[in-house]
Image (cartoon, helix red, strand yellow):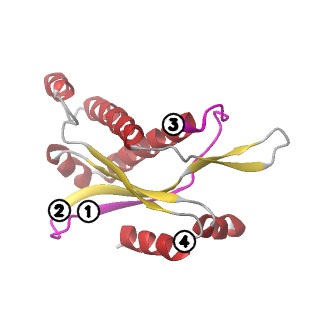
Amino acid sequence: PLIFSRRCSSNYRCGKWVLSVPKWLRHHLTKDAPLACQVLRIFIDEIEKQLKKSCGGISRDAKLGAVSFIQCFGSRLNLHIHFHCVVLDGVFYSDDKGTLQFADVYNFGKEDSDHVEARVRKRVLSLFKRQEILTEEQFEELKSWKGNGGFSVNADVQIEEHNRGGAERLIRYCAR
């Protein structure tokens, strides 16, 4: 684990992923920490699925490397729960000999983050319906909204490999 940590901070490219949810759902997340953790789990799962898809032919058991932060405030120190994740640009998997390998993803773009956003939106709305936070009528209405329906996934910030200072600044920013 110590070697893994050192390698992640200097030898791999990483990016910052941010998930914001619609205002009408945020207050539920601030009152219910387990619910917020479920939303974060959905977000991480969908990023991992997209990374695996981008690697092509990688084992279903492949895993991403990420550090996550739940922030409860916006730029004006207003209540605004959202999720920051620093994610390595690739996945870890075991080769035929059982040795841990890393598959880089170099062609990840806006289309990929848009796919993540759409799937997160669908799964989070379903979660809120299952938890009886949304009625069937509200669920159907929100599901029918065009565009992102108030959900936002941003993955524009990238840190190149061997940029230890950039990775440190990114982690400090997310942890603030």
What's the mark number on residue 49?
3
In this figure, which residue is indicated by the disc labeled 2?
Answer: 79
Which of the marked residues, 1 or 2, is nearer the chain's N terminus? Answer: 1
> Where are the magenta residues, as a range?
54-78
Q: Are marks 3 and 1 in contact (CB under 8 Å)?
A: no
Q: Secondary structure at mark 4?
A: loop
Which residue shows up at 61% across the image and 47% down it? 91
Q: Looking at the figure, which quarter contains the N terminus?
A: bottom right
Tell me the chief SS of the magenta region: loop
- Between the C-alphas of marks 4 and 1, the distance is 28 Å
Q: Are marks 1 and 2 in contact (CB under 8 Å)?
A: yes
- The mark lying in front, picked from 4 and 1, is 4
Q: Secondary structure at mark 1?
A: strand
- The mark lying in front, picked from 3 and 1, is 3
Q: Amino acid at mark 1?
A: Cys
Name above or below for residue 145 compared with residue 168: above
Q: Are marks 4 and 1 in contact (CB under 8 Å)?
A: no
